[in-house]
Amino acid sequence: MTGPSFPAEQTGRRFGSVLIANRGEIALRVRRACLELGLRPILIASEADGAEQPAPADGGPLCIGPSAPGRSYLNQAAILLAARVTGAEAVHPGYGFLSENADFAEAVEKAGLVFVGPPAGAIRIMGDKIAAKRAMMAAGVPCVPGPGEPLPDDMDAVRAIAEGIGYPVIVKAAGGGGGRGMRVVRGGGEIADAVAITREEARRAFGKPELYMEKFLERPRHVEFQVLCDMHGNAVWVGHRDCSVQRRHQKVVEEAPAPGIAPALAEAIGERCAEACRQIGYRGVGTFEFLYENGEFFFIEMNTRLQVEHPVTEMTAGVDLVHEQLRAAQGEPLDAARFGGVAAGHAFECRINAEDPVSFAASPGRIARARFPAGPGIRVDTHVADGYRVSPYYDSLIAKLIVHAPTRDEAIRRMRVALSETRIEGISTNIPLHERIFADPDFGAGSVDIHHLEKRLKEVDHAEA
């Protein structure tokens, strides 16, 4: 597969060492992949993560700053200095933190290092929801109804746009993400307040007040497509995932493949995603996120990094996505013939968080005992063990429990057993929530939308009251 000439910044070169600009399970996941490819991994850590400052040759984590993320994992100067003093030749950002920061990707390249991810230009395009929508429309990717332009300041013009789309609509921040910077509007009387509040929220949270508007879909599923790209114009899609089990727009359980999607439709959408990557000069791994309702796909955003839920695709597509990232960053051509988009079996991932399973309050503290299941079709990605102290400074994710089986029903049964065998003592976790999800008959039928979990939680609260 060939595409247009790529930007000058697409220059791959060989490297032998990789600084991993992240923490927790993803840092260990990338470290393992580096070792498997014969690369020297270099770990960093904040003071809260128990880092000392060993000599770089020792291979231990290098302390890059205090506990607060802004002074450590988000401190670009400290990370680039760590790369220089340790002799790193490349930087892998993992997910979260600086992984989708175009300025950081640019700074890494300007420092003479390889950024293991897409070029800064592609990150900028896809990081701005309006620019991303325009790019997807140009590539023929189906989008949620609504103009790919920022909302004007004139409220009469805004009302005209909403009426043209048809209520309900959703007002979103162009630079938003993670469920922030959005408001649902069900009638013309609500539009002025919704725009004013969301614009101010966007300015404060994301540093840019631009908004856009789309049709609000009432009961969609969240389905995403995984893509792989090199810097020679090759791009493929390697399967899709369902991430509809969410709470407050945060994913809780993911699975691959997404159930009930017609193969011909999946093929058409996957190829559109691959073509979009060729048009924007993408490199490495990426994820196109869609809302799926009544047999139709609607693009919402692209994540220009490795996803938390990447293991379910790895298990069903037979691919190591971190290996592919590292190869693409070194300029190796993608062997497109290896990938056909057909899933082998079914996989689930449960995000195990250090939080109360009822109130969802964070539960930092020391883990007295951690025991995880093992056996055929079971994978655990984690950085915790007996005695590990969960910090209050960072995301509450402490482990990802992944299972794989020949069929979806078998995978559900395998996950139930795996959850029952998981023991984490000393702190609270959301394992009981996962057990309830996998006992839910609607979830078992593969028919839940993005609002299903919150509805179930409200039913439980009402019953207990």
Image: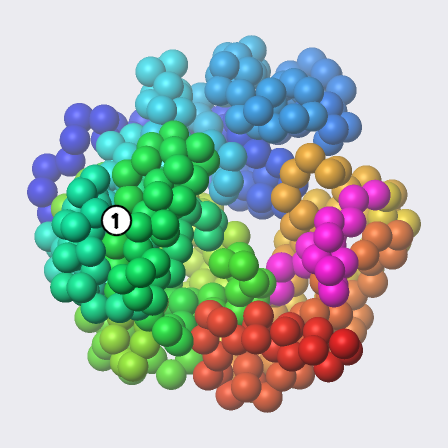
- The residue under the point 75% across, 70% down is 432
Residue 64 picture quarter: top right
Q: Is residue 356 magenta?
A: yes
So how many labels did they put on this image?
Answer: 1
Residue 228 relative to residue 383: left or right: left
- Element under disc 1: strand
Q: Quadrant of the N terminus?
A: bottom left
- The residue under the point 73% across, 31% down is 49
Across and down, in percent, residue 370 comes to 83, 55
Task: Name the residue type under label 1.
Answer: Tyr
Q: Is the image coloured rainbow, by chain, by secondary structure, or in one colour?
A: rainbow
Task: Work out whether residue 131 or residue 425 is closer to the camera in this orientation and state it.
Answer: 131
Residue 239 makes an appearance in the image: no
Across and down, in percent, residue 331 comes to 29, 35
Q: Quadrant of the C terminus?
A: bottom right
Q: Which residues are magenta?
A: 349-365
Residue 63 relative to residue 250: left or right: right
**Pointer 1 residue:** 212
- The residue under the point 16% across, 31% down is 7
Across and down, in percent, residue 299 comes to 27, 60
Q: Main secondary structure of the magenta part?
A: loop
